[in-house]
Each structure stands twice: as structure tokens, then as C-alpha cells.
Amino acid sequence: MNRFEQAVYDCMKPTEALLAQTTNPLHRKILLNFWRHVHLEGAGLYDRICSDDMMVANPVYRVTWGANPAVLEGRDAVLAFYNSVGDVVLWNSDDKIAVADWGVADELTFNLLGLGGIMQAIGYAVPDPHKFYHVQSRQAFIWPYDSHARLAGEHLYEDKTSLTWVEVDEAELTTAARVKEIQKELLDQLHARFGENFWVYEGEKATA
């Protein structure tokens, strides 16, 4: 296992640690939705993210990555966004995460690993489209949730002053396909640990 694959395996440990300290039932379900969402997204299972028990009917995403900030409204736009990212590895690290009735706030390092041409298409001015880069920036992820612990949107604010990239030797790379396998493995572990419909909030009955 290389260092990038290990980072993907470790990416939700801050969420796990916060969940262990959280007793409010709504907050726990929000964190479990958030945790499951990350693994679903990493595994490419976007339809499950946009299901009625995970997301409100009309989510609003505000994305400020790269050079092309955008506002996306509705599940169809969200699905199109996920499918547009391309063959790139994504993960979060160095999280400082909090949860409240309204949702999740997470200041984190956002990591992208992939071909320079894909990075350029996103809006990162890496020098060579044919080489591979690890791109990083500090970002604030503000994810509002509704009173049923369903995602209402993602507000992704990038600190442009923190943006860095470094060329990565091909011998060090992992692939998007391999990371999807890792995320699916982690998703299966999450389901085995917490049980059926563990992310669904049922008011005061929610105890997962």
C-alpha cells in the first residue's frame, strides 16, 4: 500500500472520533450521513448519495474549486457535477470538524491526485498536462442538513492562498479505480458496523 492509499483509508478518522464524542441523536445521524456520503462518493455510487433518505429534494451546492466557481441546484445538477470530475483521486485530510443542528463544518486539506490535463480542466494551472500532480488546498466544507439529517447542500470554499501542487512520479501513483475499491471496502465496513439504514433519522427514536 502506498502513501496515497493509506491517506484514503485514514480520511474519515476525524469524523469517527467526533462521532464517539457525540450524544445528540440528530447530530449523530448527520455525522453518519456525512461519513457514508464520503465513501459513496469515493466509490462512484452517486445515485445513492442523491436518494430520498440521504438528500433533500432540491440541494444547493456552492463549489469554489479551481478557476470556475459554480452554484448547482437540484439532484440532476449534483449528479452531473460528480460525473464531471474525471479520473482523479480525491480525499480529505487534517480535518477540524464540528456538527450542530444545522449541519457539518469541516476545515480540511483537500487533496487531488491525477493527470495534469485533468487538473488544468478543473482550473489548477499545473505546468504539464501529461505529468501527474498532487494538488492540495485548505478548504472550508459547510454542509447544511435538514431536520431529518438529510443533506441540503455543500458549500465548498477554497483558500486560494494555500494552494500547492507537486509532481508525482508514476511509480508512486495509485489509480482512481483502486481508490474506488478502497472506498467500497470502507463503505461495507461502515454498514457492517452500524447496521441497516444507520444514517436514517427517526426523531427521538434515533439511537445509532
Image: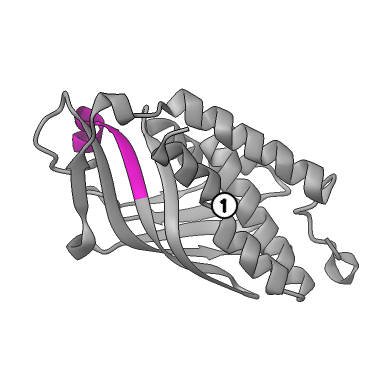
Q: Which percent across, then down, holds residue 164?
A: 20, 52
The residue depicted at 80 percent of the width and 51 percent of the height is 194
The image quadrant of residue 196 is top right
The residue depicted at 35 percent of the width and 48 percent of the height is 111
Q: Which percent across, then down, holds residue 110?
A: 37, 53
Relative depth, front residue between 66 and 184? 184
Q: Residues within 10 Å of mark 1 (few under 14, many from 20)?
A: some
Figure disc tally: 1
Judging by the rendered image, the residue that carries numbered circle 1 is: 58
Relative depth, front residue between 138 and 144? 138
Which span of residues is magenta-colored?
111-121
Q: Which percent across, then down, holds residue 133?
A: 23, 37
Tell me if residue 113 is in the magenta stretch.
yes
Relative depth, front residue between 136 and 33? 136
Identify the secondary structure beneath mark 1: strand
The quarter in which the C terminus is drawn is bottom right
Relative depth, front residue between 72 and 155? 155
Identity of the residue furthest to the front in this view:
1
- Report the side of 186 relative to 177 (left or right): right
- Report the side of 155 relative to 187 (left or right): left
Q: Which percent across, then down, holds residue 181?
A: 57, 28
From where the camera sits, is residue 121 visible? yes
The residue depicted at 36 percent of the width and 32 percent of the height is 88
